[in-house]
Amino acid sequence: MAQLDLRQKLAILADAAKYDASCASSGTVKRSSRDSKGIGSTGGSGICHSYAPDGRCISLLKVLLTNFCIYDCVYCVNRSSSNVRRARFTPEEVVTLTMNFYKRNYIEGLFLSSGIVQSPDRTMEEMVRVARLLREREHFGGYIHLKIIPDAAPELLADAARYADRLSTNVELPTDIALAALAPEKKPVEIRKAMAYVSGIREASRPEGRVAGRKQPTALAPAGQSTQMIIGADGADDAAILHRSSTLYAGYGLKRVYYSAFSPIPDSSSRLPLAPPPLMREHRLYQADWLMRFYGFDAREIVAGGEDGLLDLAIDPKLAWALRNRDRFPADVNRAPRELLLRVPGLGVRSVDRILQTRRHHTLRLDDVARIAGAIDKVRPFIEAFDWTPGSTLDSAALRSRLRPEPQQLNLF
């Protein structure tokens, strides 16, 4: 095989990394111990664009250390039996690329994953070496996200947590049955064991006390850990997917669960679907996930209205819930508790908090709510104000038709 230069390796291994969605950099802290003599920050713009929950655009060099892999996961384009062009970086090459791209202001950090070569320990050891060289030799203070290899030794996972801002261990598929069928070399118990270990060492590293009323960030992997599920490669419905996400959040303190719509791959197995799921399904799952994390929704109630266990693709899950629970509305913006206001379609967390703050000083009218929320059409049928009551407008069919966005308003990408 002809020797590949660095540019060719980058083209292959950056393309191979595109299927991993779990690379947002929100939640990190500045590495002050290195700031006085180092370079790098967690703000900027560059190659691979992701978005933090606050809307900030972030940029990462997103690559695999290698796309060689000893595993033969059916859904993976880099599986051992796949006929793809292969490449492998040395740790030094990844460090060189990262520093060169950062100095040119192309990136603000690194997202590094890898196929499994030789063994989980050997692969994890090389990934940790990249992070260690960046931190200790190059004094790089920017963002680093490392993918955890579940079967790797605990001491390697601890080293990864010391050097990285965020770690992620992909559960891959929503159910253990699907994982056993499509990725038999990957063991669900080992994935959960790795996640539990990372969660434990992170919490043990958290300083006592609080900052601005919140827990202190952990010393290890301060931006937390995340995971990813592939959607549509197996028969799991949205109820099963959200239930798995809920247990992951509760059990391992995850920062994020990412959802990646299955994309058909070359020379795929007959066990995989021929067509990808609708991109809107992925979008609805992210919306539902947001409701669980920030709005107090339980996974079971979000999909309770779908007999097939799927989210409604035509309207967002919060509106779908409100239309199924009309008896809970209208909510009086001057008296309703925060928990109910958070369930009003069109009201976000910040809007609800502003409503609660404002109503302490004066009675809210509909115009006040419109100014706070920024838009009132979606909100109006579900609230009461001093000068407004929706009366008989709460008809589910009519509201669904009126509040359903036009096709050009749907943000699919």
Image: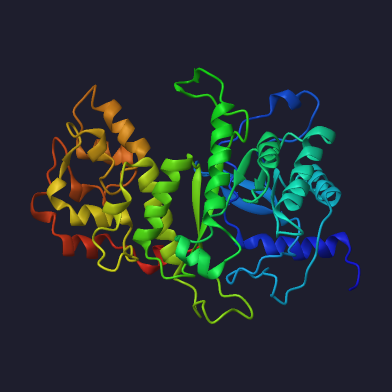
Measured along the vertical axis of the image, is residue 381 above or below residue 209?
A: below
Corner quadrant of residue 32? top right
Q: How many marks?
A: 0
Corner quadrant of residue 336? top left
Q: In this view, does 64 lie to the left or right of 231?
A: right
Where residue 51 appears, as percent x and y from the top left, is: 55, 48
Measured along the vertical axis of the image, is residue 262 above or below residue 154?
A: below
Q: Nearer the viewer, residue 15 or 187?
A: 187
Q: In this view, does 124 lie to the left or right of 88?
A: left
Residue for point 57% across, 79% down: 269
- Quadrant the N terminus occupies: bottom right
Corner quadrant of residue 194? top right
Q: Which residue, as the protein is rendered here, is positioned at the far left?
A: 392
Residue for point 69% across, 75% down: 81
Where residue 62 appears, as percent x and y from the top left, is: 69, 54
The answer to whether one can see residue 94 in this image is yes
Q: In this view, does 365 lie to the left or right of 54?
A: left
Measured along the vertical axis of the image, is residue 266 above or below residue 70?
A: below
Residue for point 28% across, 49% down: 345
Where residue 201 appears, as percent x and y from the top left, is: 58, 33
Q: Which residue, as the protein is rendered here, is positioned at the far right?
A: 3
Q: Nearer the viewer, residue 221 or 355?
A: 221
Give the image's coloring scheme. Answer: rainbow
The answer to whether one can see residue 261 in this image is no
Where residue 192 appears, as percent x and y from the top left, is: 52, 48
